[in-house]
Amino acid sequence: MSHSTPSSTPPTDTLKAPSAWLLALEMRAFWEFGAVLPAWPALQRAPQGDGHPVIVFPGLSASDGSTVPLRRYLGSLGYTTQGWNQGANFGPRAGVLETARRQVLDAAAAAGRKISLIGWSLGGVYARELAKELPDHVRGVITLGTPFAGSPKSTNAWRLYELTSGRDIHREAEHYTLHTAPPVPTTSVYSRSDGVVAWQGSLQAPCPRNPHTENVEVIASHFGIGLNPSAWWAVADRLAQPEGAWKPFERKRGLHGLIFPDPAR
């Protein structure tokens, strides 16, 4: 079972961005995606989906093209998936969040049921914030390498964020309580070897008001976590949780335990 016990207080500026060495290791993302093919037979043994809609939000400067492999995998398990349909993600510029909010409402209305939201990096911030606003329409949230619990500059991408969005990252963060979990089942998939986001900034603190929050650790790069077979398995496992019958991610012994390390180690 994967849990952590970080402080429930708001983040401070003491958390630093990953080292240059970890950032250099991000090139392994290509190998992670290459591992999908040999892992495919095992990935197909993941729990089958119940057909509910899933929206996947891409990371900073990325587009829906980056989430195609994950969405196709989830489609093979029976889910109805869609991208965010707004081109490259250059931050919450004018109209971006409003369009995303309408997409969530329309998808839930068309399906006649709650939907799940998945977000990669910055996309996970959107997913969490939308779930806070629309808990009656969102079934659960899964984030991949998303920075929400650290200081705004505890990543190696904050300068790119300011450049592409045209916004001061500190002022932007003041508008939201990013470290607060949505009032729906929420899973943060993270990696200690993330070269872009400080992994501590992806740890969801225990929330008495929402006991259905958890952290699942995988061995992945930041650029590859959305293409990583281990992360895909975790996503499939979490999406398959029956609505209203959520249970924490089960970290088993043996090989499964090596793939999903014990965060309390």
Image: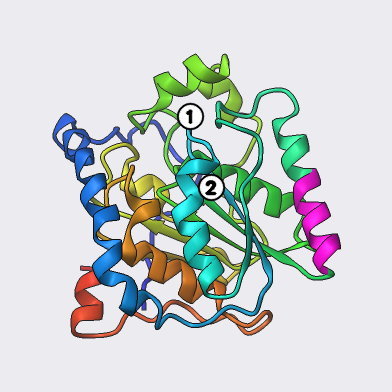
Quarter the C terminus occupies: bottom left
Residue 142: x %, y % from top left:
53, 60
**Circle 1 SS class:** loop
What distance separates the C-alpha of mark 2 from that of mark 1?
14 Å
Whether 30 is drawn above or below 242: the answer is: above
The quadrant in which residue 166 appears is: top right
Quarter the N terminus occupies: bottom left
Is 26 part of what is drawn in magenta? Answer: no
**Which of disc 1 and disc 2 is earlier in sequence?**
1
Q: Count neighbours of disc 1 (C-alpha within 10 A) and say few if under 14, some if 14 to 19, many if 20 or more.
A: some
Give the main secondary structure of the magenta stretch: helix
Q: Which residue is mark 1?
A: 61
Q: Is residue 264 visible?
A: no
Check disc 1 and give the amino acid type: Ser
Q: Which mark, by number, is residue 124? A: 2
**Circle 2 SS class:** helix
Residue ID at (28%, 65%)? 37
Residue extending furthest toward the left: 21
Q: Give the extent of the magenta segment.
A: 102-111
Does residue 198 appear left or right of residue 57 in this picture? left
Mark toward the viewer: 2 or 1: 1
Residue ID at (53%, 47%)? 124
* Front residue of 38 and 178: 38
